[in-house]
Image (cartoon, helix red, strand yellow):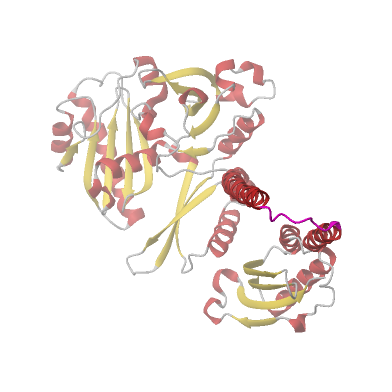
Amino acid sequence: MFKKKDKQITVFNNKKIFFVTYDNNENLSVIDSHPIDKFLSDNFKIEDINEDARSKVNSLLIVPDYWFGNNTYVFQSKKKSLVEPFIQRKLTSEYPDLPDIKDFFEYNFYETDLKENGLYVYFLHEPEAILLHNRLAEFSLNPHRITTPALLWEQKLKKNMPDSQEGGKALVHLLSSECFLYFFLRGNFLFSRTINLSHSERGTSEKFIPLAYEISQSEYLFSQKAKANVEQFFLLSSGEKDSQELSKLLGKDIKDLSDKIVIPQTAVDIYESLGTVSPFNSDDLLPSAKYLSISYGPLKQEMAWKQVQHAGIIIGLILLLLLSVESFFVWESYRESIEWKTKSGIMTQVDPKQIIQEYNDALDLFISDTERVSIRETLLNIANSLPENILLEKIGLDVDTNPGVEIKGIVMASGPKEFRNLLSLFLSNLGKHIQGSRSLTIHDIDFEFDEKSAGEQGYNVYLMKFRFDLP
């Protein structure tokens, strides 16, 4: 499913956008690059992008760590229908100047120290990130996934260091002119820092003195944010004695990862251009890799729907094949029966009136089937009737003896008045979209107040259930 010749990744680093793929030796290869200011300007056209780059599928966009934000919330429910609206409200209230943020987030569940259900939410909160995404989409290069080096490291550490998911951990990634610091809590990325190394200090042990100071300051910041200590430091560096030098200055045991993580051999100019992304190989960046990422909300729904369509086509083909095989065996059985009767001399003349009657019965059956209620059309009409704060948990359809619809769901409202208005709007919409439901009133609906969620996240939850007949 993953064809390297058809896919590429896009990297933003040092104020430039890079279109990157892999050569035959699985090494990084830059197809094209542009300064971000030029790429986002009105004068930039799709023809300015290398033809090879614009002909590929953009499977991944890697952006700086600080373009991502992350928060944790205590939230007891694990229902997607409750979790996602809650996160959207939180993000839009915290970033009122960034309305598109509601389409750029993901989350996972975890258990807090108090054994409560928690949400770890990560999101794009840099305006330039959304501008970059929109420009790529304009050129039909909208990325399927968006991630950061820190989230790629998070997965790489989990894969190579199983104990990295326990307590506080820090990774020091040391390059020739830069040092990247990553801090993780229980395996989840918390924050990162970039430290520029002085040219005069490169290649000497003196460079570790200011570096050790910056690491100590970052460690203190981690303890303030996480209310925990860094239990283990990891170092990835090309220097054989770098871990020993840092250990002496910090007074801590630093674990060298050079024997655990193999850095691919990449051309020096590419290594310097892509910075912290350069150590990742093709396995780290495959679409099937489990690193945390964000997908643009509407694009994620579109891709999910395509999977459903593909599954439906496959199932349809299988059913067609089975029916074709069955029809073949039925026809063969019928033909052999006719041949046997003919050879045995017991074939009788068929009455033409009987044949006509059989055709009429088959036609009546066909007409009866075509007059049945369309399940697909009914579901679409119900979906079009839903107000924003009503979520359906169950839809039961009876299309045979007594056609009707049974609906069960929840209503999120600030109070009884808003609850009544939402129900009235729902019933009014059903009357417009589905003939036969016009006589429904609020009195036809069974509902109860969910006391467990009273006032939770600024709204109350009401449980509702009702049924209406179809024509």
Q: Toward the viewer: 277 or 437?
A: 437
Q: Does 450 sit left or right of 66 as displayed?
A: right
Residue in view at x 56 percent, y 65 percent = 82
Residue in view at x 22 percent, y 42 percent = 233
Could you tell me what secondary structure mostly forms the magenta stretch? loop
* Residue 97 appears in the figure: no
Query: Residue lying furthest front in this view?
Result: 345
For residue 77, above or below residue 60:
below
The image position of residue 274, as x and y in percent, is 41, 24
The image position of residue 17, as x and y in percent, is 52, 25
The image position of residue 74, as x and y in percent, is 44, 65
* Residue 317 appears in the figure: yes
Q: Does 284 sit left or right of 147 as displayed?
A: left
Total labels: the figure holds 0
The image quadrant that residue 375 belongs to is bottom right
The image position of residue 4, as x and y in percent, is 46, 25
Does residue 346 belong to the magenta stretch? yes
Residue in view at x 38 percent, y 38 percent = 152
Q: Toward the viewer: 270 or 179?
A: 270
Q: Toward the viewer: 24 or 389?
A: 24
For residue 216, above or below residue 8:
below
Query: What segment is highlighted magenta in the picture?
Result: 345-352
For residue 415, above or below residue 368:
below
Residue in view at x 58 percent, y 43 percent = 310
The image quadrant that residue 86 belongs to is bottom right
Does residue 98 belong to the magenta stretch? no
